[in-house]
Amino acid sequence: MFIKSLRLYFLIHSLTVVGISMTKENHCYENAMAERVNRILKDEFYLDQTFDNVNHDKRAAKNAINIYKEIRLYLSLDYKIPNMVYKLST
């Protein structure tokens, strides 16, 4: 299960412009930011389930990333969407 979660973590980050945040020991679960992202993906987008196949897994991850970046509002961003904040800052 850990390997599957780690692969999903790398897949999600490979689809975004955000770099992977890892500790010196290369354990993403030791990093607070990675922990928060993993918790959100599992709790809000149900990515902790067992998928039938890799295609289902990839579709679910891509959908979660899209919602996470394009639809989900963030309290820390004054209830704005990350992409909106990024576009306004450039």
Image (tube, helix red, strand yellow):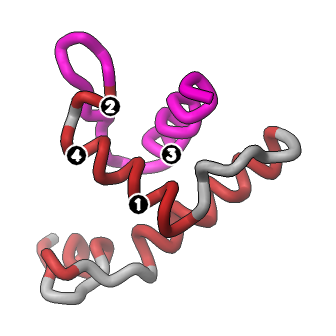
Disc nearest the viewer among 2 and 3: 2
At 57% from the left and 38% from the top, the residue drawn is 8
Q: Quadrant of the N terminus?
A: top right
**Name of the residue lying farthest toward the right:** 52
The magenta-colored residue range is 1-27
Residue named by callout 4: 33
Q: Amino acid at mark 2?
A: Tyr
Q: Amino acid at mark 4?
A: Met
Q: Residues within 10 Å of mark 1 (few under 14, many from 20)?
A: some
Dot 2 lies on which element? Answer: helix
Dot 1 lies on which element? Answer: helix
Q: Nearer the viewer, residue 72 or 32?
A: 32
C-alpha distance separating marks 1 and 3: 13 Å
At 58% from the left and 23% from the top, the residue drawn is 3
Residue named by callout 3: 12
At 49% from the left and 33% from the top, the residue drawn is 10
